[in-house]
Amino acid sequence: GNGLRGFTTTYTHEGSYALVGRQGALCGNVNYATGKFWASEHAVVATPRVDVEIHWLGELMRAMDLNQYSVSAAQPGLSVVIVGNLHIPVPP
């Protein structure tokens, strides 16, 4: 936002993940990360409980319009608990 917020030499995740923006006017947007990365509290890192194609999961979440679950405030935001409780049917 306004300069360096922190610094780390480690990472929180490794692999391929769909990320959901948690705050701001565009909360609910879906992006992707692959490799080693550090995710802040401003992103929900979608971690499937079963083996699925990550881009399929991300595009399904995009179609679900996750912004509809945001809480209105000065800065709209998504609750990790609400997003985590959404059930996504996975085809066999």
Image: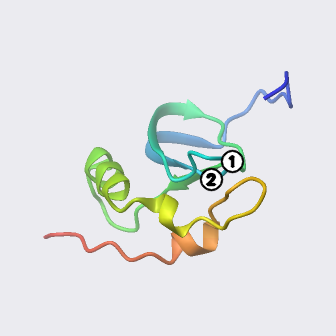
Question: Which amino acid, mark 2?
Answer: Arg
> Dot 2, how many residues are within 10 Å of its Cα: few (below 14), some (14-19), or many (20+)?
many
- In the rendered image of this protein, does residue 31 appear above or below residue 45? above
Q: Secondary structure at mark 1?
A: loop
- In the rendered image of this protein, does residue 79 appear above or below residue 67? below
Q: Which mark is residue 22?
A: 2
Q: Quadrant of residue 17?
A: top left
Question: Which amino acid, mark 1?
Answer: His
The residue positioned 49% from the left and 65% from the top of the image is 68
Q: How is the image coloured?
A: rainbow
Specify whether 16 is left or right of 1: left
Q: Which mark is residue 55?
A: none
Specify whether 13 is left or right of 75: left
- In the rendered image of this protein, does residue 20 appear above or below residue 7? below
Specify whether 14 is left or right of 91: right
Q: Please identify the quadrant where the C terminus is shown.
A: bottom left
Residue 41, horizontal then vertical, whole percent: 72, 50
Residue 69, horizontal then vertical, whole percent: 53, 69
Residue 39, horizontal then vertical, whole percent: 65, 42
Mark sitting earlier along the chain (1/2): 2
> Dot 1, how many residues are within 10 Å of its Cα: few (below 14), some (14-19), or many (20+)?
some
Q: Disc 1 vs disc 2: Cβ atoms closer than 8 Å?
A: yes
Q: Please identify the quadrant where the N terminus is shown.
A: top right
The residue positioned 66% from the left and 37% from the top of the image is 38
Residue 24, horizontal then vertical, whole percent: 66, 47
Q: Secondary structure at mark 2?
A: loop
Specify whether 87 is left or right of 92: right
Q: Which mark is residue 42?
A: 1
The residue positioned 45% from the left and 39% from the top of the image is 31
Q: CA distance from mark 1 to mark 2?
A: 5 Å
The residue positioned 71% from the left and 44% from the top of the image is 40
